[in-house]
Amino acid sequence: MKILCIADEEYKTYWDFFSKDDFKDIDLIISCGDLKASYLSFLTTMTSIPVLYIRGNHDDSYKTDPPQGCICIEDDIFSFQGVRILGLGGSQRYKQGINQYTEREMRKRITKLKFKLWFHRGFDILVTHSPARGFHDGTDLCHQGFQVFLTLIDKYRPKYFVHGHVHLSYGRQFQREDMIGDTKVINAYEKYIIEI
């Protein structure tokens, strides 16, 4: 199965120069946040591929104008062809915003998922907007990752951890790929294709 992961910046080739051929082998699209709702709606309409999404720290408008025809996996585990996908959007709280959380608030969100995690026997892909602490994150509070994501990965050992939020255009020090134990960490900025 091929999954197209997208985040933070609309990929011009898909948006301005759309060709269905670019999606011929793609089974699923996952948005890691901070993309226009109209972009996600466009992708699912033009490709007929399911689009899953979580909210980024700039996606406050999703509350009143969510992406049409797409599936929100925020605080949920969504199963697609046997692949279990857990979604946790938002970033560290650095100002007022509905998609920003303290470390404690993110930990509470995960605690509320206890039954779903048990029922699904874990998950295969962790989808977040923010990175994990110490992996692809920044030093400023806005771009600092969540420590609790490391705990979640250590306990459930998913195959992939896919996030956005940290733009690769910020500088060369930001990596595209990494590993946390056996879990492959992917920064989905703009676009990245994974196979599972």
Image (cartoon, grey):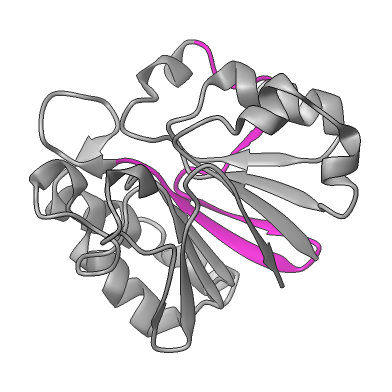
Q: Quadrant of residue 153?
A: bottom left
Kindly give the residue lying farthest to the top in the view shown: 64
Up/down of 77 relative to 156, above or below:
above
Please state the horizontal and vertical placement of residue 98, each as a whole percent of the image: 27, 26
Residue at 20% from the left image edge and 47% from the top image edge? 143
x and y percent of residue 52 in the render? 63, 42
Horizontally, residue 152 falls left or right of residue 193, namely left
Q: What x and y, as percent, mark residue 77?
A: 56, 56
Residue 95 is left or right of residue 177, and the answer is left
Q: Is residue 80 magenta?
A: yes
> Where are the magenta residues, as a range?
65-90
Vertical comparison of 189 with 120: above or below: above
The quarter of the displayed image where residue 142 is located: top left
Q: Which quadrant of the figure contains the N terminus?
A: bottom right
Residue drawn 47% across the image and 46% down it: 189
Q: Does the rendering let one see residue 108?
A: yes
Q: Residue at the spot x=33%, y=26% of the render?
A: 58
| Viewer-nearest residue: 20 or 78 | 20
Near-viewer residue (193 or 117): 193
Residue at left offset 85%, top offset 33%: 47
Left or right, residue 103 beside residue 132: left
- From where the camera sits, is residue 69 visible? no
Q: Residue furthest bottom?
A: 181
Q: Is residue 6 left or right of residue 96?
A: right
Q: Nearer the viewer, residue 46 or 146?
A: 46
Question: Relative to 29, is 56 above or below?
Answer: above
Question: Does residue 177 belong to the magenta stretch?
Answer: no
Measured as percent of width and height from the top left, residue 105 is found at 19, 48
Pick whichever, 31 or 122, lies toward us: 31
